[in-house]
């Protein structure tokens, strides 16, 4: 019997829209990755998942090694989020977030976040409101910041902002290492070569196959 050929792995970058979960199937009535107008190869899965109420850069691949290499290895990888919070955030609060905060863990107990990069930024000029998301009235005071983490605890960015006294209104992942969301619109995706994918994410090329 002739063996099946081993197909090369494929790598995708998606701008996940608000309200879509990072899954292809679900028992719940939710918007799924399979609702996208694209024929993904068998075995495609999301890595570095985003919650339904979060937006932005989501990686998809047929390579099962990527999650371990990117998020479970000894080398820490930066991931950056653009965050809109309610009220004006102070420099003192930003400094506390940079130093690390105690947040509630997923299974109970508390966790001290690692030091991270937090910067105040101007409101993006070309950012679309999320379909079905929280649309902010122009009179409500708010701030925009970027947060760059090397860890990804359950709803960590939202919990860090909450512990700092600010409600998150929008949360958009804009990059992982040098792989940026760029000009992809919500719901759009692009395919990258294996070499570019590993290079931009700063992954060890000797472990490409799997």
Image (cartoon, rainbow, N blue to C red):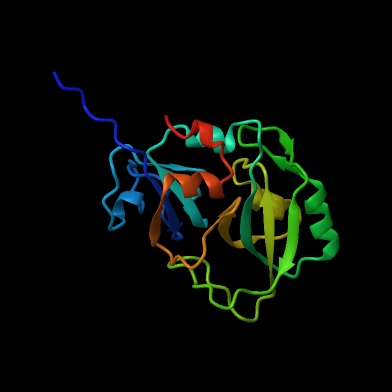
Q: Answer left or right for 129 relative to 36.
A: right
Q: Residue furthest left?
A: 1
Q: Residue 126, relative to residue 19: is it above or below?
A: below
Q: Answer left or right for 180 relative to 210.
A: right
Q: Nearer the viewer, residue 161 or 3?
A: 3
Q: Image quadrant for the N terminus? A: top left
Return the x and y of residue 11 as percentages of the image width and height: 41, 46
Q: Image quadrant for the C terminus? A: top left
Q: Residue furthest top?
A: 1
Q: Nearer the viewer, residue 129 or 119?
A: 119
Q: Tell me what residue is drawn at x 49 percent, y 73 percent.
A: 128
Return the x and y of residue 141 as percentages of the image width and height: 69, 75
Q: Residue 62, relative to residue 174: is it above or below?
A: above
Q: Tell me what residue is drawn at x 54 percent, y 76 percent.
A: 126
**Where on the picture, by quarter, is residue 91?**
bottom right
Q: Answer left or right for 189 relative to 87.
A: left
Q: Tell me what residue is drawn at x 50 percent, y 55 percent.
A: 57
Q: Nearer the viewer, residue 108 or 202?
A: 202
Q: Residue furthest bottom?
A: 139
Q: Tell me what residue is drawn at x 39 percent, y 44 percent.
A: 23
Return the x and y of residue 190 as percentages of the image width and height: 39, 57
Q: How many marks?
A: 0
């Amino acid at each position: 019997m002739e063996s099946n050929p081993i197909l090369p792995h494929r790598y995708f970058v998606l701008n996940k829209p608000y309200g879509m979960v990072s899954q292809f199937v679900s028992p719940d009535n939710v918007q799924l990755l399979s609702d996208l107008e694209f024929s993904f190869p068998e075995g495609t899965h999301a890595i570095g998942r985003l919650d339904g109420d979060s937006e932005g850069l989501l990686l998809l691949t047929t390579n099962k090694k990527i999650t371990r290499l990117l998020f479970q290895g000894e080398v820490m990888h930066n991931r950056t989020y653009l965050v809109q919070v309610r009220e004006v955030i102070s420099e003192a609060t930003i400094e506390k977030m940079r130093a690390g905060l105690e947040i509630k863990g997923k299974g109970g107990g508390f966790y001290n976040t690692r030091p991270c990069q937090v910067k105040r930024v101007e409101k993006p000029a070309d950012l679309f409101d999320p379909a079905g998301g929280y649309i902010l009235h122009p009179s409500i005071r708010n701030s925009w910041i970027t947060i760059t983490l090397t860890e990804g605890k359950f709803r960590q960015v939202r919990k860090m902002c909450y512990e700092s006294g600010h409600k998150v209104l929008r949360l958009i992942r804009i990059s992982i290492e040098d792989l940026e969301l760029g000009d992809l619109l919500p719901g759009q995706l692009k395919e990258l070569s294996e070499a570019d994918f590993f290079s931009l994410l700063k992954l060890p090329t000797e472990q490409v196959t799997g």
